[in-house]
Image (tube, rainbow, N blue to C red):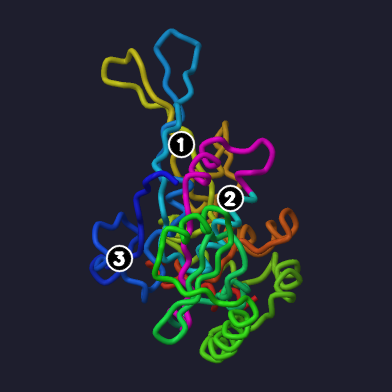
Amino acid sequence: MKKAKVVAPRKKGKQFVFDEIDSPGDICLEYLPTILPPKKYFFPQKEKLGSFKAGDIKFSDTTIEIEPTIIFGAHTCDIDGIECLDMVFHKDPSDPYYSKREKANIIIGYECLKPCDGVATCVSMDTHLPKAGYDIMMTEDGDKYILNINSAEGDELIGKLDILEPLKEDVAKLRLKKIHEEKIKKFTVKLKYTYKELPEVFEKAHKSPVWKNVGERCVSCGNCTTVCPTCYCFNVLDEMELSMEKGVRERVWDSCQLEDFAKVAGGENFREEREERQKHRYYRKFDYPIKKYNKFFCTGCGRCTRACVAGISLIETVNGL
């Protein structure tokens, strides 16, 4: 295994961010979901795709050099978000930029045993328990941690540590079962609809008055999509140098909540009204992905609610349908 940088949740003001760690003392494992999810290490906010020269029709792809990265302390909801992105970016043809970053990353998850706050709905979205997508998962067990290894990379990393005690698989399963039974008692914030009911709810909600109400409050800032662990819309921009002789092509995050997002040639805008854009966002989480990937693209992390300057709550919106 090559030498890798370590990124982990750390305190920033009153909030938390995933950032490179210099000292173990900087790490905060008991944290509210970070401002941006760890998807930024797979799908950066801004990424160079290639370069070009004026008058030359050839486009030079960027050689993707990725530093190996250990993402330490990721919550199960954020790991689920990366699983969603995998479905999108690995759909044939696979995105080479995403794939290269994914192969360079190792995820060490940290299972939260108590709810973040009153807006996280991970239980309703079935993302509160570790399932897949990680290399190592840490679950607190008294004054120790149970480590579940889920990949060859995770096994190799664990092999470098000499402070671990072996635990028989049946014993580990029994302990985790008891831990999870106690955990679920604490996670009481849920949507009023069950996981299985949600597809039918959205199938019938196209003309719900909820969308008008939400649209009247929305200011189209795009915060909700920026902080979302599963939003993957992007724009491609060509930036010329001041000499106007050469330039670079970059991929940057975009948002379906911005007014010009669905505008096409001739000035037509397919989602000109804010209520249409908000409705589209919810359907991109609870309806369209179910039909395409058989999976919800809402992880229940609650970031969209926390980041909304208009105070729009995902729980209130969905429960109102």
What's the residue type where badge 1 is placed? Arg
Q: Nearer the viewer, mark 3 or mark 2?
A: 3
Can you give x and y, in whole percent of width and height, for residue 192 in the image? 63, 83
Question: Is 215 displayed left or right of 84 in the figure?
Answer: left
The secondary structure type at the circle numbered 1 is strand
Is the Cβ of the residue at disc 3 closer than 8 Å to that at disc 1? no
Give the position of the C terminus as an image quadrant. bottom right
Q: Write down the residue under mark 1.
A: 251
Residue 91 is inside the magenta segment: yes
Q: x, y (%) of residue 184?
A: 57, 87
Find the distance from the CA under tag 1 to the CA under tag 2. 23 Å
Q: Residue at x 48, y 50 (%)?
A: 255
Query: Does dot 3 land on a helix, a strand or a loop?
Result: strand
Specify whether residue 26 is painted magenta.
Answer: no
Residue indicated by mark 2: 271
* Position of residue 275 measured from the top left corner of the image (x, y, whole percent): 56, 61
Q: Secondary structure at mark 2?
A: loop
Instruction: Give the residue number, with chain letter if any, for mark 3.
Output: 10
Decide which of tag 1 and tag 2 comes sooner along the chain.
Answer: 1
Say which label, 3 or 1, has the lower sequence index. 3
- Identify the magenta region: 88-116
Task: Work out whether 316 lies above or below 263.
Answer: below
Task: Looking at the image, tell me whether mark 3 or mark 2 is earlier in sequence order.
Answer: 3
Task: Please name the amino acid that badge 2 sits on.
Answer: Arg
Residue 119, compared with residue 8, is above or below; it is below
Q: Residue at x 60, y 77 (%)?
A: 168
Residue 271 appears left or right of 293: left
Can residue 85 be seen here? The reply is yes
Q: Is residue 223 above or below residue 53?
A: below
